[in-house]
Image: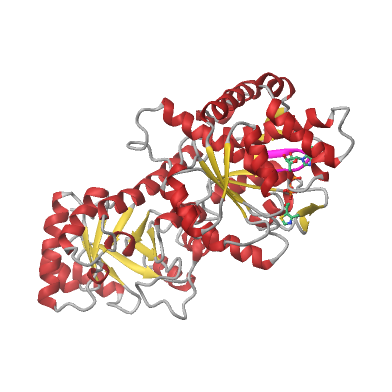
Amino acid sequence: MGRQAIDYSVYLVTGREFLPPGKDYYESLEESLQGGVTLVQVREKNADTGEFIEIARKTKEICDRYNVPVLINDRIDVHLAVGTAGIHIGQTDCPLPLARTLIGDDAIIGLSVSNVEQATRAAQHSDILDYIGVGAVWPTGSKDTKGRKSLGPDGTGEILDLIHGSGLEAVAIGGIHLPNLAQLLHGSVAPKSRDALAGIAIISDIVASTTPKEAAANLRLVVDSFKRSRQALKDEAGVFGGLGQKRAEVDAKKLAEKVQELMAVVKRETPLVHQMTNTVVVNDSANVTLAVGASPIMSTHPRDVHDLSPAIGALLINFGTIGDKEGMKVAGRQANVNRKPLIFDPVAIGATSYRREISEELLAHWQPTIIKGNAAEIGAMAKSTEVASRGVDSVGSGFADPGAVVKALARKRAAIIVLTGEKDYISDGSVVIKISNGSHLLERITGSGCQAGSLIGCFAAAARLDYLAKNETKFEDDSQLVQGDMLLAAVAGILVYTVASEVAAARPDVKGPGTFRAALIDELYNLTPDVVAEKAKLEIL
Ligand SMILES: Nc1ncnc2c1ncn2[C@@H]1O[C@H](COP(=O)(O)OP(=O)(O)OP(=O)(O)O)[C@@H](O)[C@H]1O
Ligand SMILES: Cc1ncsc1CCO
């Protein structure tokens, strides 16, 4: 008999101390298995041996019914007494060679690893070990992580590179919650080897939930979605299975036709687009939203944004004048939970360290669907020094290879990336679309990028509604975090905005930025799908 194959996707670590009042441990466990937990570790820090054995035995009995393997934390004797699939041990527990001798060749051994030195040692013991638990990824309440630096997605990815080729699987643990899960999975893909996590270990998100079945199912959806999108990337089909087509099949003319169709969807559905934006542009952004046929709501208070989430079509978070960070956290988290498109506009992120910190904090709370920025902003997100910023603007001539920058960042962040400027570049990690429309007058009014972000929000809402109208299955058997063609939505937002700007700039009554600003709103309102198709300058790179 060899060691059994393990699915690490959603790995539940038990913790009876986190159960909500009145919730029975076995009831919670069974519900979480129904939700899609794939592996269970029994972790009992304070139980006597007899009690631990009894808990492990009953846990195994329940898990057996769902064909889910059980591991025991730390206690080889409990594992041997109950006959579970294996053990999970910490750095200061039983030495690895002794553990392997005691439990034999057929049982699984996992080891906790919290830094590169420990990971290197684990890789050297790959003949003894099966997997490593990497963490804490983020600070956590369930383990004492004081004094230890949490790894973040980047540190986790570094460890994946270190164990590359060793045959070890890796599971991340610590501070992982539904809203930061997609960011962790995609953000931790190893920079060199491109290896990925095999799964995530979860305690409180499942155990502390009053509805563990739902909690587990939501986590499982994101992990499955990640695994599917990795397959899609391997197949060259983009992080959202973009345009439902492979790169070679995307054609500029067909893309323009799809934009035309989406314009009609916005007008028909008048989606509500929630915008948390800066105080400079709030009025213009609401007006361009209305002009294309959508409906804006500009709201920032945490309580207000929580209640709005079920009703909205999409959410825009633009931190241009920084304020309401708490509201942004709540709104973004709710957008993820309700599977609404979330457009992130990290205005001037390259200009100050405070903005970079806020961006990281927000991105640890939720997963954006689309990230839009000018060259300085996208450069800062990509940690590139090629383009500098001066306040909210970019300086210099831009990236040598903008297409490569947006494609790499899309893969890294698992989001559609929109890079604006004289030419715009949009990527889903597979396809790169270049748009050469627009007017230089857009550089002469404030907030043109912010308004473009608002329009992307309008079209993202429409793309999701269009998908839901055409697909009966809705969410049940689809593992996408957000449904609808988000690459198309980003293209539509930029194309409609820039084509309207060309029409406005060409008007004889437009004398400069002031008249252009008003004319732009009018031309967005009057823009027909035919004019968009006729003027579109789209290229597939
Ligand atoms: N010189 C130009 N020619 C054509 N289109 C342009 C030009 N500059 C910007 N645009 C368009 O204007 C919009 C905003 O892009 P830009 O990169 O200026 O945003 P931004 O710097 O974030 O703006 P802001 O900070 O004022 O909101 C995009 O749709 C882009 O295509
Ligand atoms: C000018 C300005 N300052 C903060 S946000 C903003 C709008 C353009 O980004």
Quarter of image, res 30: bottom left
Q: Position of residue 209 (x, y in %)?
A: 29, 60
Q: Nearer the viewer, residue 76 or 426?
A: 426
Q: Position of residue 106 (x, y in %)?
A: 21, 59
* Position of 354 relative to 525 (above/below): below
292 to the left or right of 228: right
Bounds of the magenta span? 420-425
* Position of 108 relative to 249 (above/below): below
Quarter of image, res 85: bottom left
Q: Nearer the viewer, residue 47 or 362?
A: 362
Q: Is residue 440 magenta?
A: no
Quadrant where the C terminus is found in the figure: top right
User: Ligand 1 shows up in which quadrant of the image?
Assistant: top right
Quarter of image, res 518: top right
337 to the left or right of 81: right
Q: Position of residue 524 (x, y in %)?
A: 70, 31
Q: Is residue 422 magenta?
A: yes
Q: Position of residue 69 (x, y in %)?
A: 21, 55
* Residue 180 visible, this angle: yes
* Residue 485 visible, this angle: no
Coloured how? secondary structure
100 to the left or right of 402: left
Q: Main secondary structure of the magenta part?
A: loop
Q: Nearer the viewer, residue 530 or 353?
A: 530
* Position of 301 relative to 55 (above/below): above
